[in-house]
Image: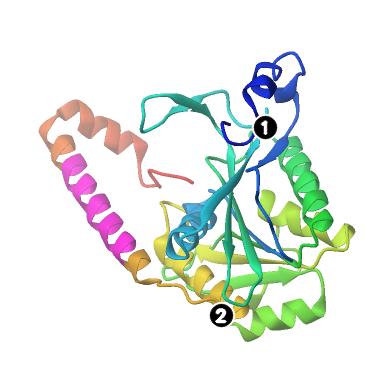
């Protein structure tokens, strides 16, 4: 967390129980002007995470903050430089030509339990209101059994915002649609706190990272917010993933045919997905 707090403050972290609760750390000097908050976490098809990270790269956003929480899993990630860091959420910022700011939020993983999602959503919204935040947009996935899922479902905290989402190409989510995870919790809490918010869900089979669904969601978000985003790299990602999965299937089939024990295991396992997001 260098750059976010002083060495003296870092030394005092343990004694203060700093990791016993969710905390938001902003880089010193960060200035945000009526920002729109866009959130995308890994979940079904990793749609939210794929869309959010691509948006951050496409707009050349800067890392302006991090979120630490005891509700991430108990592991560390080795960095490019060979050191270690905790699992975390990341905040990216970008000032648009219009003068308004975008604040993007994603994380290495979903929170390990529902308390973490509620705590982070509440603290993030409290901070967002304090700095004069304009609107919250969340992105995620919705499981369907269709062979070619392509729709983007949406719901919002008010009719005006829902209308804008529909005009951008989304379809209103059916009544009773369950939205699991921070994408839904954040919007529902935003309504209670008086913050305009909308959620976009890409239809997906949810069996593997879904670049196509992420592209569909991001296209709708970009249109509603009048943001120019190059979506072509997501097509490349989808093509590369398809080739990788086909190669893995060929290797697996060859292994099964080569070893009688593997054939027995395959027959006992029966049909079904090999990967669930």
Q: Which residue is mark 2?
A: 223
* In this rendering, position of residue 262 left or right of residue 130: left
Where does the image place residue 185, in percent across and percent down from the top left?
A: 75, 52
Neighbours of disc 1 within 10 Å: few (<14), some (14-19), many (20+): many
| Picture layout, residue 254 above or below residue 212 | above
Q: Residue furthest left?
A: 258
| Picture layout, residue 265 above or below residue 152 | above
Q: Is residue 73 visible?
A: yes
Q: Quadrant of residue 67?
A: top right
* In this rendering, position of residue 111 left or right of residue 83: right
Q: Secondary structure at mark 1?
A: loop
Residue at 43% x, 64% y: name it.
58
Residue at 54% x, 56% y: name it.
48
Residue range highlighted in magenta: 236-253
* In this rendering, position of residue 53 left or right of residue 266: right
Please say whether residue 244 is one of the residues in the magenta stretch.
Answer: yes
Where does the image place residue 168, in percent across and percent down from the top left?
A: 60, 82
Q: Which residue is mark 1?
A: 69
Please say whether residue 202 is one of the residues in the magenta stretch.
Answer: no
Q: Is residue 170 visible?
A: no
| Picture layout, residue 82 above or below residue 33 | above
């Amino acid at each position: 967390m260098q750059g976010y707090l002083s060495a003296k403050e870092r030394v005092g972290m343990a004694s203060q129980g700093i990791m016993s609760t969710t905390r938001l750390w902003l880089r010193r000097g960060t200035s945000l002007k009526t920002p729109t908050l866009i959130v995308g976490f890994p979940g079904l098809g990793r749609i939210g995470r794929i869309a959010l990270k691509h948006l951050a790269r496409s707009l050349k956003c800067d890392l302006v903050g991090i979120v630490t929480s005891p509700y991430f899993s108990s592991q560390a990630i080795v960095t490019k430089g060979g050191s270690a860091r905790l699992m975390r959420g990341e905040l990216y910022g970008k000032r648009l030509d219009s003068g308004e700011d975008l604040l993007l939020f994603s994380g290495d993983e979903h929170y390990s339990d529902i308390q973490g999602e509620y705590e982070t959503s509440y603290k993030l919204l409290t901070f967002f209101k304090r700095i004069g935040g304009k609107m919250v947009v969340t992105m995620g996935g919705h499981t369907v059994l269709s062979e070619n899922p392509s729709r983007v479902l949406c719901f919002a905290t008010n009719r005006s915002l829902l209308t804008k989402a529909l005009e951008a190409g989304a379809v209103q989510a059916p009544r009773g649609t369950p939205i699991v995870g921070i994408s839904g919790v954040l919007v529902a809490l935003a309504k209670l706190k008086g913050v305009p918010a909308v959620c976009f869900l890409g239809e997906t089979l949810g069996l593997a990272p879904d670049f196509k669904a992420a592209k569909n969601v991001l296209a709708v978000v970009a249109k509603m917010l009048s943001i120019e985003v190059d979506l072509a790299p997501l097509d490349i990602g989808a093509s590369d993933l398809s080739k990788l999965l086909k190669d893995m299937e060929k290797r697996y089939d060859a292994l099964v045919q080569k070893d009688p024990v593997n054939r027995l295991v395959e027959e006992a396992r029966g049909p079904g997905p090999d990967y669930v997001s």
